[in-house]
Amino acid sequence: MSLHPTLQPYADAWTHSIEAISELVQPLVEAEWNRRTPCPGWSVRDIVSHVIGLDSEMLGDPRPIHTLPRDLFHVTNDHQRYTEMQVDVRRHHTAPEMTSELEYSIIRRNRQLRNESRDPGAKVRGPLGAELTLEESMRTHAFNVWVHEQDLRAALGHPGGLDSPGAHVARDVLLGELPRVVAEDADAPRSSAVVLDVHGPLEFLRTIRVDIQGRGTLETAPALGPAATLALDWETYVRLACGRVTPKAVADRVKTEGDPALTAAILRHFAVTR
């Protein structure tokens, strides 16, 4: 048996991103592990700890028994507390300890993928005891690891990977959230359309149509006379959608047309990751 074809793109995306992360952090001296990243509250060490933790979850390892400090300002809900456990438990690990554990987790995860024969619809454990399909789990995992690769690249001054396999997974994951953002969060008018025009390493044009019931759908066909149009580069799109920057901070990189109240509302709700 081998990995199901539906799952292969997510395995490829994870492999590309995790190898990039390994190459980025391998030569770092101790002080560089403490550099701030665009991910709120997290250093380079914290990002790598989180990535190791994500892979340990995929491997089915038991979660660490650890008590979080009370003064972590960026931890405000149960999901963040769940995530922070894998990070905080490694906050005092040295650079060699971090790179060794990362490499060991990559070896184990590669072995798991080589032996993975389950159907994409098989149910697996998710965060906080949630149940999801193997396909959903692997897609989310590939997305998360790629986003954190970008966090590390920004922190360390090594741009790249914006058109990698993980970038394509991220595009589809983020676009999947847009109908809700436009139709529900931004409350776009019924029977209207919003156009998103993205350029750069990944280029795409998408239309979000809102029907008479207020439901949003994502389409590839362009809209005539949309209520609003947003044009921006792919890197800015990712940074906005993942909550790494505010709309105000990148206002010069986002061009809008149409209803200004609607475009402002869309940008206000653009961040879709927790």
Image: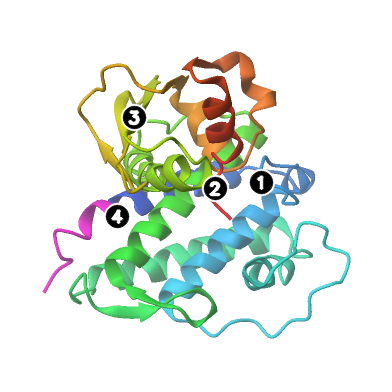
Give the percent coordinates (x, y) of residue 146.
45, 46
Residue placed furthest toward the right? 71
Type of amino acid at the residue the image marks with label 3: Ala
Task: Answer above or below: position of 199 versus 208.
Answer: above
Q: CA distance from mark 3 to mark 1?
A: 32 Å
- In the rendered picture of this protein, how many numbered marks are placed on residues? 4
* Marks 2 and 3 in Cβ contact (< 8 Å): no
Q: Nearer the viewer, mark 3 or mark 4?
A: 3
Type of amino acid at the residue the image marks with label 4: Tyr
Q: Which stretch did the figure color magenta?
A: 1-11
In the rendered image, residue 9 lying in the magenta stretch gets the answer yes
Query: Of label 4 and label 1, which has the lower sequence position?
Result: 4
Which mark, by number, is residue 39? 1
Q: In this figure, which residue is indicated by the disc labeled 2? A: 148
Q: Residue at x 35, y 36 (%)?
A: 164
Type of amino acid at the residue the image marks with label 2: His
Residue 2, quarter of picture: bottom left
Q: Residue at x 67, y 33 (%)?
A: 246
Q: How is the image coloured?
A: rainbow
For the question of whether residue 176 can be seen, the reply is yes
Q: In this figure, which residue is indicated by the disc labeled 4? A: 10
Give the percent coordinates (x, y) of residue 43.
72, 49
The C terminus is located in which quarter? bottom right
Label 1: how many Cα within 10 Å (few below 14, some 14–19, many 20+): many
Type of amino acid at the residue the image marks with label 1: Cys
Q: Label 1's element?
A: loop
Q: Label 2's element?
A: helix
Q: Residue at x 42, y 47 (%)?
A: 17
Q: CA distance from mark 1 to mark 2?
A: 8 Å
